[in-house]
Amino acid sequence: MENPVPKERYMKFPYTMTAKVVFFPYKHYWKHAWFTRFWLGGILVTMPIMWKITKM
C-alpha cells in the first residue's frame, strides 16, 4: 500500500491524539518491551474469566 502523503509533509510533532496513535512505534515496543507482551497476554487470559464471573 502506497502512502498518499509524502514524508516531507508529515508533522514534526504529532499534536492530535489520532496522530499520536498513528505514529506510535508499536512494532518497537512489541519487540523490545517484555511488559507489553505480558500485559496483552494477561488481558487476553483474564477476560474470559472476568466475563464468566460477571455473568453469575
Image (cartoon, grey):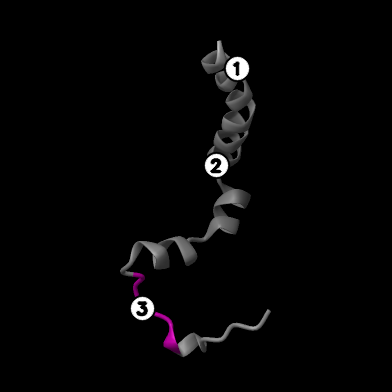
10 Å crowding of disc 2: few (<14), some (14-19), many (20+): some
- Residue 13 included in the magenta stretch of the image: yes
Q: Position of residue 56 (x, y in %)?
A: 55, 10
| Residue to which mark 1 is pinned | 52
Magenta range is 9-14
Could you tell me residue 35's position as x and y percent?
54, 38
Residue type of the residue flagged with mark 3: Lys
Identify which residue is drawn at 55% across, 42% down: 36
The percent position of residue 16, horizontal first and vertical second, equals 33, 67
Q: Secondary structure at mark 1?
A: helix
Residue at 52% from the left image edge and 61% from the top image edge = 25
Tell me the number on the disc at residue 36: 2
Using residue 12 as the reference point, say whether residue 54 is left or right of it: right
Which residue sits at x=34%, y=73%? 13
At label 1, which amino acid type do we have? Answer: Lys
Q: Secondary structure at mark 2?
A: helix
To which residue does mark 3 refer? 12
x%, y% of residue 40? Answer: 58, 37
Q: Nearer the viewer, residue 25 or 17?
A: 17
